[in-house]
Image (spheres, helix red, strand yellow):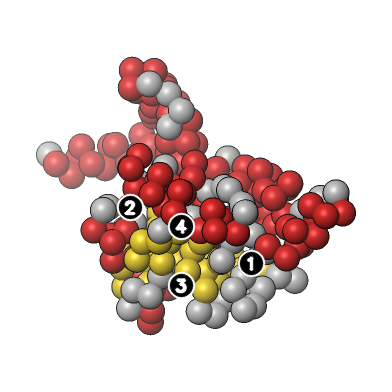
Amino acid sequence: MTIETQISEGVGVVTLARPPVNALDVETVRDLTSALGAMDADPQVRVVILTGKGKCFSAGVDLKRHLQALETNTAGPVSIGVDMYRAFLEGRKPTIAAVNGAALGAGLGMAASCCIIVASENAIFGIPEIKVGMLGGARHAMRLLGHSTVNRMLLTGHCLTAQEMYRRGAIEACLPQAELMPFAMNIAREIAERDPTAVEMARKTLADVEQMGVLEGYAHEMAAAQELGRTAAAQQAMRQFVEGRR
């Protein structure tokens, strides 16, 4: 397997494990898509952390496998990438990217597809495909960074350090390597302690409204809030808060 998984205290950890740089070939894309689907369906899992094994998060698509697919007119990692991103973006469980090293191309895309991103101080983020006859990742980068920056990254292969990503507000934290997973686990446990129905509805609502205008998005959120408010757990939480204030 190119993916390692574990579950503890309501937190699922999915680790890219294809050394040396956790590049994505067809098997890895399929294994990752399957692992995310399994975590999403598991009632024990409340939140998922994605990270990479070794010193790299992911260097993106395996260029050798991609070229072989082009030369033989067969399915390569790029051809099935949409299913993988659908598993990230349409999953019910919140996801946290713990970026432990380089996140390039599809590596940046996977991180950007997670709900929360934290990174180690040695991490870098980039879309270097222009240097090797490829494209991709810019739409994902647009979720994190502005128009000019994304164009510079796409057109030149320019990379940003984790420190720069943090300065721009694109990631939640830039940490020493040893502190990365404990920090991500603390956020994950905090999410896992919340009402799972509320968390899943919040996760879905935010994913939905990202594609909407302001008023349409607000109306959608309020409809979800009404639905959540009808649950016993939500009403109990409201009652406890009101009584506590009094």
The residue sitting at 43% across, 32% down in the picture is 210
- Tell me the tag on residue 23: 1
Distance of label 3 from label 4 (alpha carbons): 17 Å
Residue carrying label 2: 170
Please name which of the two marks, 1 or 4, marks the residue nearer to the observer: 4
Distance of label 1 from label 3 (alpha carbons): 13 Å
Q: Earlier in the sequence, mark 1 or mark 3?
A: 1
Note whether residue 230 is visible.
no
Q: Residues within 10 Å of mark 2 (few under 14, many from 20)?
A: some
216 left or right of 61 in image: left
Give, as a three-letter code, the residue at label 3. Answer: Gly
The residue sitting at 79% across, 52% down in the picture is 70
Q: Earlier in the sequence, mark 3 or mark 4?
A: 3
Give, as a three-letter code, the residue at label 2. Answer: Ala
Residue carrying label 4: 157
Note whether residue 202 is visible.
yes
Instruction: Residue 59: name its quadrant.
Output: bottom right
Q: Residues within 10 Å of mark 4 (few under 14, many from 20)?
A: some
Please name which of the two marks, 3 or 4, marks the residue nearer to the observer: 4
Distance of label 1 from label 4 (alpha carbons): 18 Å
Residue carrying label 3: 101
122 left or right of 90 in image: left
Q: Secondary structure at mark 1?
A: loop
Instruction: Residue 142: name its quadrant.
Output: top left
Tell whether label 4 touches label 3 (CB within 8 Å): no
Give how far across and how far down residue 127 sits, in percent: 49, 55
The residue sitting at 73% across, 65% down in the picture is 64
Give, as a three-letter code, the residue at label 1. Answer: Ala
Give how far across and how far down residue 31 sits, in percent: 72, 60
